[in-house]
Image (spheres, rainbow, N blue to C red):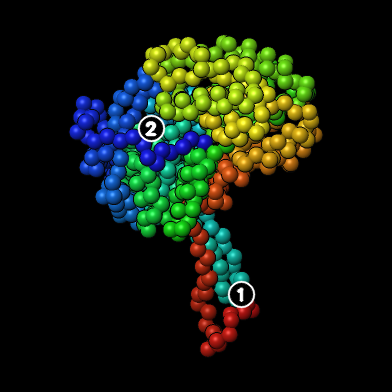
Amino acid sequence: MSTIDLNPDTTTDDAVTELPTVPHWINGAAYPSTSGRVGDVYDPALGVVTKHVALADKAEIEAAIASAAAAFPAWRDTSLAKRQTIMFKFRQLLDDRKGELAEIITSEHGKVVSDALGEISRGQEVAEFATGLAHHLKGEFSEQVSTGIDVYSTKQPLGVVGIISPFNFPAMVPSWFFPIAIAAGNAVVLKPSEKDPSAANWLAELWKEAGLPDGIFTVLHGDKEAVDGLLTHPEVKSISFVGSTPIARYVYETGTQHGKRVQALGGAKNHMLVLPDADLDLVADAAINSGFGSAGERCMAISVVVAVEPVADPLIAKITERMAKLRTGDGRRGCDMGPLVTKVHRDKVASYIEIAEEDGATIVVDGRDVVPDGDPNGFWLGPTLIDSMPTSSRAYTEEIFGPVLAIVRVSTYEEGVKLINDGAFGNGTAIFTNDGGAARRFQNEIQVGMIGINVPIPVPVATFSFGGWKASLFGDTKAHGAEGVRFFTQQKAITSRWLDPSHGGINLGFPQND
């Protein structure tokens, strides 16, 4: 998954007065920064800074959290019916105006507009799930568990909850968390990526238009100081994070050390196992779509095709043929794939191609040679296909997070499964086959959290939960679905007795049922 830069390049307001600065959103309004620190926000297709984003200091962190804490009690006590009304309004406004949000995402992230619309729609699924959250907030009731005694449970919100989200999905990933958190009665403080921050402010304004009380949805922009502020502040009860594995581990360890409930989703190295009986045209399409969509900047992108021989050569021919038709360029021009988010990230991804080549892999299609349909200063790297990737290479073992698709050849199904299971990550995987028995065996044996059977990007719908295994998830709770409801609520069990005219008098023994 994407990384959060805990130490980004910063400048001072005095040096950048000619460009706008994206402000925080605190207590229902834009909150101009006084810290004097800002970060650069690029248009990746042009390669130029188009605006700046405020980077919070301690005082602004305190202001954001204090505003959310002050707003929480009234929202907690707001009826479920009223909360649902606001959720329905937010969902409708988002549906009506998601084209605006898609344009914002493309201008700061670089993904093509159609892809941006796709991420918004997937996030909208969680908002739709949250419109029915009253059903999921019901407790349980047992009558007459003992003579004249009933026991029942209730689910209540946590309080102020923090969300730290990555650059690759500035709308969808926060939407995995905040609709459920808000519908359950919590107050949210969102710390979006400083690389593409404007989507968060747009969502904040939409919440206000939908009628959400001030302070319940706060946007705090920043870098490591803002992250650590959320992780350590005693008023913040939980943290939801998506990003790279090293930072996910840091977030989990720091947050739990400070007594917080933490769900931290980390990195990925997703494999697609292709059996000899698979439809190779379907596989080639799936490999292109899952490997190069959003320039490979997806935590669910397929980055390794594990080809059970003899399918590798014909599959490579089909993939190469399709790659030749892809158009890389400005996402506002109807291209198939846009730029990478920053020049630094583009250069890092390109370095893995060099590493693979040095380690003995064959570069079938080299994206470093791409001629883009866009400004030459954009952060361009074309789709890349690498054959015979050594599994000892860093280009295989590490998350690349770019449009680089590797082929690893194996002799048997068993060898392919072992290769996947031996990896450090366990986010998503897929198998392509026409053998139902092999597919059923695969879903049972594979040690990965999300599995696709002839489906290349197995992102579950909102009624199920999103998250991986091993180094792809820290904590025991995944995003959205039933696990999301459990994460953002805490349960009370009440034991009650009414109008019982008798009692047992004084008895210091442990209570027993009768």
Residue carrying label 2: 195
Percent x, y of residue 467: 57, 42
Toward the viewer: 495 or 256? 256
Residue located 52% across and 54% down the image = 138
Going from the N terminus, do you reach mark 2 or mark 1 first? 1
Residue located 30% across and 35% down the image = 10
- Residue 14 to residue 310: above or below: below
Q: Residue furthest front?
A: 358
- Residue 50 to residue 325: above or below: below
Mark 2 or 1: the one toward you: 2
Toward the viewer: 76 or 503? 76
- Residue 447 to residue 314: above or below: below
- Residue 142 to residue 179: above or below: below
Q: Is residue 184 visible?
A: no
Residue located 63% across and 14% down the image = 320
> Based on the displayed image, in which of its 4 quarters is residue 432 positioned?
top right
Query: Between marks 2 and 1, how big is the CA–CA gap?
Result: 59 Å
Toward the viewer: 497 or 117? 117
Residue carrying label 1: 146
Q: Which residue type carries mark 2? A: Lys
Q: Residue furthest bottom?
A: 506
Percent x, y of residue 67: 29, 51
Left or right of 474 on screen, residue 437: right
- Give neighbour class at mark 1: few <14, some 14-19, many 20+ (Cα, 10 Å): few
Percent x, y of residue 351: 51, 26
| Callout 1 secondary element | strand
| Callout 2 secondary element | loop
Q: Which residue type carries mark 1? A: Ser
